[in-house]
Amino acid sequence: MQPQRTWMLPNMMTRTITLTNDVISEWRPIEKLKEQPVEMDEEESKDEGGVPNTRIDFLCENVDDTNCQAIVVMFLQIPFEGTEFAAPDIRALQATENDSLITRDLLSAYSRLQEGNCQHTPAFLGTLEEKQDPYSWVPGGYTFFLGFTKVPGVPLGTKCMGEGVFYNLHPKKKEAVREAFKVAYIAMTSCGVREWLDRCLNHLVWDESVGKVYFVGDFGPTDEEWEWNPAWWRRWNLNEGESVGM
């Protein structure tokens, strides 16, 4: 299997990302966490109604306080397959505005979480939208950044069933996690937001010092009415070792 190519330009790790929300904050990338490209040629772009793009998640540190870390997600337009090495003025003809559904939904979800003062998800830090310069992949194309805080605690599990912190906890601690999960889920959904996650325990972070669960990952807005149901413990694989009658 060929390694996935990266669309991250070398200067990305040396730049500063200025996010604007209620306040302005500056962040410096220190690690690339993951990259998810959506590559397509021009015909596929027309058929699917979108443009090729990539998403890159960065771990960042605050310029003024390097002990303060955040996750900044970058959405970047990339050129059609087969035109990667065409002249810049040719690639510039592909430039478009950001019409990505996921960026709109992420921004809407984090805005709702902020308005609802949700304490069980990362805090929204703001956004930055730029046009790509003449030396980028698609000159004049979009680059969109969205940032949120890195929450305290440890992931309750991994992507593998039965593996991780939760499964090694004492039964009473597991019950405490389940109750904290319920509080967190109700807090999130009361803001009109649901998770866009695969319901693996790596998306749940446990801060034992305060008995708190955080959801981490992608979120989306929803206007559906929702009520808590204990079935959500099972759906998130948190029912292992539960007490009878829970």
Image (spheres, rainbow, N blue to C red):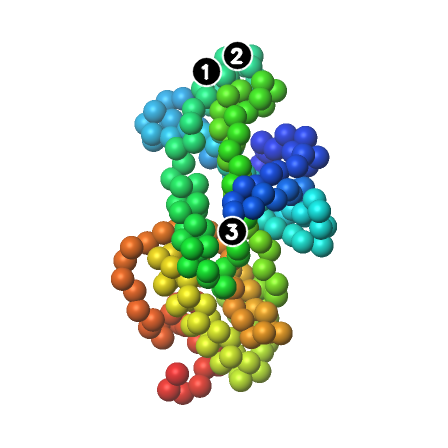
Alpha carbon separation for disc pair 1 and 2: 7 Å
Q: Nearer the viewer's eye, disc 1 or disc 3? A: 3
Q: Where's residue 102, x and y in %?
A: 41, 42
Q: Nearer the viewer's eye, disc 3 or disc 2? A: 3
Tell me the element at label 2.
Answer: helix
**Residue of label 3:** 124
> Which residue: 46% across, 35% down?
38
Q: Residue furthest front?
A: 22
Alpha carbon separation for disc pair 1 and 3: 34 Å
**Residue of label 2:** 89
Dot 3, how many residues are within 10 Å of its Cα: few (below 14), some (14-19), or many (20+)? many
Tell me the element at label 3.
Answer: strand
**Residue of label 1:** 93
User: Looking at the picture, which amino acid does disc 2 mark?
Assistant: Asp
Alpha carbon separation for disc pair 3 and 2: 36 Å
**Nearer-N-terminus badge (1/3):** 1
Q: Are marks 1 and 2 in contact (CB under 8 Å)?
A: yes
